[in-house]
Image (spheres, helix red, strand yellow):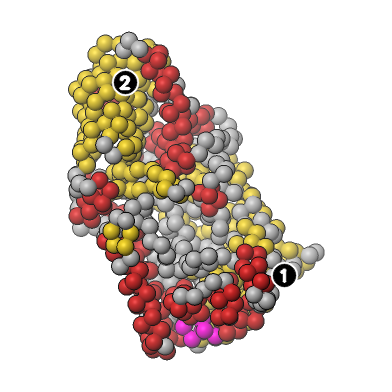
């Protein structure tokens, strides 16, 4: 299953973009103020008068120790009365000891050592931390001699890197002092391990992290060597999981969307934001970079916002999200709700050909603060010959003047809302009181249709819809007896172009390949018995099991995602074992072989602790095959 990930370590995401691209970043402007400040942060400049010889500086931020022994340093010009960065050449060292075994293991995988003790010869620092400037100044000696040449050399790298750091610095700078918000990005070069990024960010859920960007065979990686909550947060949390305390909650999400197949969506969204701490003046949300925000309001009044423009060209930009920063007129107060409203539009849906649309391919389709449960009231306006299927229960549907208006309301708060759009044939089944509908189109997407046509085949997913509805009903019945009653009153299963499937509360995107016959899958090159089993039986029951594991309850941090994947698959296998014991063996043998796969850096099973979650897939460990994909 491919989950919709709302990455809390936003700075890391942005950095990948900054590293891999030469595109530009622009911002949408409503009025001056924070946006003007953001622009200045994006365009750092130096003054030859602010370049010094520096000696013996020691900086300690929680677990992170940076020392500078000797060299040349230039300060970035003040922005709004604050120095926000510096560049350095000379001799320095960073020292960091991860606080637990999982993180030390991770670090050792990448560096060969459980402790990070890294000398460096150059450094880029970007920060929102006035005390840090004073600490640096304490080591300043005489003005540097080759000042002009030094700052000329650093101008371009500092500008490129600013794209990843401007938003978190602004977030930190705009907080009131009681938020205690601090940010530091240190990028060091000339180390025995190449270029390395270190972050100290009090607005992140894991405040300390170390990472490295790399490109292997044209694939970009951003390897997180280690990441953890800083010392004071660990101490304050005691036995509690420090990641389990969100900055915000969300309630009463209302969304009206106009969809124009094959690609366009325009929408108005509104929800209540409940701050769980005081002092933040900037709220950061995630939204597909294919969607452009045209308006943001807080309690009815327009506010400034910043949206990083899509960086074209890279594969990352095709599926990634932008970050949106909205700047509030005054700091948020803990537990005092505010109403946020947005208008936005863009080509967020992907046309897969054959009138099939991949709605989830281009990032998140509504402004989202990250993991939080809310009710959703969704209204879609679509051409009358298309149908919309969404999370929640359909409570109204009407057709007038060639348009169809469909409204869905969730029976209880859910963690994420999705929809699918198509020219579908519908089949129904039921499991006790749960209504189940399956939706198949009359064809498959272009990328599959060609191979099928060459084999003389013409797949018709609509033909399979009844069989799929019944299979889902049997799964809901089986799992309701094993687990709890089904969490929602209905389950909608819709054909989705592509090879991945995905579960949303009460809604499943099921890959087109699951709507094919075995012969039709053979025509696509499916030979492996496990993959055939996966596509014919296991995928649908795995996604159905996610209705309990992942939709009714969700993970708090990426470190827990494995629990939900494991429980969903275990639930699906329980059913398989009962109905087709031989298939169960095929699956287990396949998983074993996958874990024992040799790579040049060792066996996959030894890539690290499961609590590292998605970090386990890195430039060092790249499994050839993931659970729900198969070779082309
Ligand atoms: Zn899954």
| Above-or-below relation of 60 to 535 | above
Image spot of residue 74 (x, y percent): 35, 20
> How would you rate the neighbour count of disc 1 (Cα within 10 Å): few for under 14, some for 14-19, many for 20 or more?
few
The single residue placed furthest to the right in the displayed view is 401
Q: Main secondary structure of the magenta part?
A: helix
Image spot of residue 295 (x, y percent): 60, 43
| Left/right of residue 70 with respect to residue 380 in the rendered view | left
Image spot of residue 466 (x, y percent): 60, 84
Where residue 50 is drawn, which disc sits there? none
Specify whether residue 71 is painted magenta: no
- Identify the secondary structure beneath mark 2: strand
| Front position in the image: 34 or 161 | 161
| Left/right of residue 150 with respect to residue 28 in the rendered view | left
The residue beneath circle 1 is: 398
Q: Residue at 49% across / 66% down in the picture?
A: 631
| Front position in the image: 540 or 284 | 540
Q: Which residues are magenta?
A: 469-475
| Above-or-below relation of 299 to 102 | above
Image spot of residue 392 (x, y percent): 55, 70
Where residue 73 is drawn, which disc sits there? 2
Q: Are marks 2 and 1 in contact (CB under 8 Å)?
A: no
């Amino acid at each position: 299953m491919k989950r919709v990930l709302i990455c809390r370590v936003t700075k890391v995401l942005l950095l990948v973009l900054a590293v891999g691209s030469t595109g530009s970043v622009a911002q949408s402007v409503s009025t001056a103020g924070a946006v003007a400040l953001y622009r200045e942060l994006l365009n750092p400049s130096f003054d030859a008068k602010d370049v010094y010889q520096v000696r013996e500086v020691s900086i300690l931020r929680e677990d992170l120790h940076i020392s500078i022994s000797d060299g040349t340093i230039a300060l970035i010009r003040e922005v709004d009365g604050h120095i926000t960065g510096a560049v350095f050449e000379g001799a320095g060292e960073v020292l960091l000891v991860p606080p637990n075994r999982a993180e030390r293991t991770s670090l050792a995988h990448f560096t060969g050592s459980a402790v990070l003790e890294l000398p460096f010869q150059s450094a880029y620092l970007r920060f929102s931390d006035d005390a840090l400037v004073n600490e640096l100044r304490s080591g300043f000696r005489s003005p540097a001699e080759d000042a002009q040449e030094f700052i000329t050399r650093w101008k371009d790298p500092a500008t490129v890197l600013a794209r990843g750091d401007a938003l978190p610095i602004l977030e930190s700078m705009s907080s009131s002092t009681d938020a205690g918000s601090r940010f530091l990005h240190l990028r060091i070069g000339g180390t025995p391990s190449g270029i390395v990024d270190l972050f100290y960010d009090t607005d992140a859920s894991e405040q300390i992290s170390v990472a490295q960007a790399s490109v292997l065979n044209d694939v970009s990686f951003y390897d997180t060597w280690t990441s953890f909550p800083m010392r004071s947060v660990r101490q304050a949390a005691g036995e509690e999981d420090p990641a389990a305390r969100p900055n915000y909650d969300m309630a009463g999400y209302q969304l009206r969307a106009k969809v124009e197949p094959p690609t366009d969506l325009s929408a108005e969204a509104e929800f209540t934001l409940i701050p769980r701490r005081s002092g933040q003046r900037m709220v950061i949300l995630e939204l597909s970079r294919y969607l452009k925000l045209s308006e943001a309001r807080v309690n009815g009044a327009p506010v400034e916002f910043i949206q990083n423009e899509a960086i074209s060209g890279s594969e990352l930009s095709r599926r990634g999200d932008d970050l949106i920063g909205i700047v509030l007129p005054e700091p948020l107060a803990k537990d005092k709700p505010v109403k946020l409203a947005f208008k936005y539009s863009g080509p967020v849906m992907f046309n897969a050909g054959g009138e099939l649309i991949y709605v989830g391919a281009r990032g998140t389709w509504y402004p989202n603060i990250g993991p939080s449960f809310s009710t959703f009231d969704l209204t879609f306006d679509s051409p009358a010959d298309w149908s919309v299927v969404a999370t929640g229960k359909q409570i109204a549907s009407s057709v007038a003047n060639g348009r169809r208006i469909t409204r869905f309301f969730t029976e209880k708060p859910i963690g994420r809302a999705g929809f699918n759009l198509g020219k579908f044939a519908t089949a129904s089944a039921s499991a006790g009181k749960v209504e189940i509908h399956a939706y198949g189109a009359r064809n498959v997407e272009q990328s599959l249709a060609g191979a099928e046509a060459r084999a003389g085949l013409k797949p018709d997913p609509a033909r399979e819809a009844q069989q799929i509805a019944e299979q889902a009903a049997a799964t809901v019945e089986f799992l309701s007896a094993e687990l709890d009653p089904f969490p929602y009153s209905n389950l909608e299963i819709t054909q989705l172009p592509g090879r991945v499937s995905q579960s949303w509360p009460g809604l499943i995107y099921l890959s087109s390949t699951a709507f094919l016959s075995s012969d039709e899958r053979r025509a696509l090159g499916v030979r492996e018995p496990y993959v055939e089993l996966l596509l014919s039986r296991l995928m649908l029951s795995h996604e159905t099991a996610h209705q309990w594991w992942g939709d009714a309850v969700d993970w708090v941090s990426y470190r827990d995602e494995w629990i939900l994947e494991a429980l969903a698959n275990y639930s699906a296998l329980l059913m398989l074992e009962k109905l087709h014991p031989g298939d169960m063996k095929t699956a287990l043998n396949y998983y074993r072989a996958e874990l024992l796969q040799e790579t040049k850096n060792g066996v996959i099973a030894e890539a690290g602790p499961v609590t590292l979650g998605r970090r386990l897939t890195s430039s060092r460990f790249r499994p050839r095959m993931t659970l729900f994909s198969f070779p082309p």
